[in-house]
Image: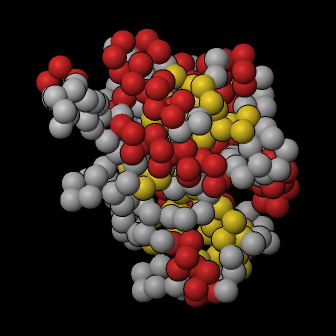
Amino acid sequence: MVTLVVATAADPASIGPASAFLAMPGWNPGPSIAIGMESFANGSVRLLKHERSIVAEDDLDRRWEAATEEPVDEVIFLSRHTAVSNRPALTVHPIGVPHIREGEPLPQGGRPCWAGPPNPRVGPWLRLMKKIAEANGLIPEFEITLEATHHGPVVNTPTMFLEIGILLWKDLVLEEGAGTYGGSIRYTSKNYVYDNIDYTLWGQNIEKGLARTKISHIKNNGDKVLLGIGGGHYVPRHMDIVWKDGVWVGHLLSGYSLPMEDPNQKKGENGEKCIGGAWKQAIKVSYEATKLAFPGGEVIAHLDHKSFKGWQKNAITSFLTEENIKIGKPQDFY
């Protein structure tokens, strides 16, 4: 079983950390699984580079296994993070578009009614990134945060995105240390950020680094896994729980992934009010994908109650009960 790390030359926030990884000892050239792709091997880690958008190459886990006969245990994508606020950030998140219906557009890849199994490293790496960032002076310039489940590409193996968000990448690349944030805080050198990302992933040794957050031990011991429902893109109420050691992270559905039609605007076949939209689909698909990633874990839904209107909260709570999905309060995860 191998860990597949994916980077794209089309994104400096992706290829930068990848190049830093390759500067570490122990790498050897690997096979090419397609034109325009190259790979490298180091122990049980495989680094795959391509030239397209990071969300454009589907099924890389299956394609790798078909080409090499090496089963992929997990996938980690390296990517740029963009935000309206332009605040520098280091983020991690699961992927999927479970709320998209057949025939609807897919602006950021994926497949309708799909969510990839979340990588169990999401929670441990979030907490580890924060510790490393604090120790190396990246905070408060950089925000360390989760993001809600969103975008592709399609994968079938436990997967996570690790993203770097910096104000103006072109300025940072051309002149390290240039510029200001908020009028007082300087840009952080891109190499300094890459070093922190590298340490998060690998520490001083690639194999030992992965072993620090080994995922196999959580698969059969009944640990609790958070399925986040509701809130904004950066899921603050769910984050309050995930900062605690020992909390595992499943899919995180923000409000935009729970489209719900006002029951006052639509009636069912019998004239009864009904709540349309793909919200049930999104919850069910995300729950099943989380169960797949944590086969021995207890998946518990956590609702951001204040983000819902009363009728929305009641409908979601009823549906979770019908599906035998446990609903938990913060103390239920510790």
Q: Position of residue 108 (x, y in %)?
A: 32, 53
Q: Determine the residue positioned at 58% across, 30% down.
A: 301
Q: Position of residue 111 (x, y in %)?
A: 36, 60
Q: Determine the residue positioned at 22% across, 25% down.
A: 273
Q: Is residue 275 placed above or below 121 in the rendered structure?
A: above
* 35 relative to 30 in the view: left or right: left
For residue 6, say whether it is visible: yes
Q: Determine the residue positioned at 62% across, 30% down.
A: 326
Q: Is residue 252 placed above or below 76 in the rendered structure?
A: above
* 55 relative to 304 in the view: left or right: left
Q: Determine the residue positioned at 79% across, 38% down.
A: 223
Q: How is the image coloured?
A: secondary structure
Question: Outermost residue toward the front?
Answer: 270
Q: Position of residue 155 (x, y in %)?
A: 51, 64
Q: Nearer the viewer, residue 173 or 153?
A: 153
Q: Position of residue 259 (x, y in %)?
A: 29, 34
- Indicate the quadrant containing the N terminus: top left, top right, bottom left or bottom right: bottom right
- Indicate the quadrant containing the C terminus: top left, top right, bottom left or bottom right: top right
For residue 90, say whether it is visible: no
Q: Nearer the viewer, residue 16 or 271?
A: 271
* 186 relative to 158 in the view: left or right: left
User: How many callouts does the rendering have?
Assistant: 0
Q: Quadrant of residue 43?
A: bottom right
Q: Quadrant of residue 24?
A: bottom right
Q: Is residue 170 placed above or below 49 in the rendered structure?
A: above
Q: Nearer the viewer, residue 17 or 171?
A: 17
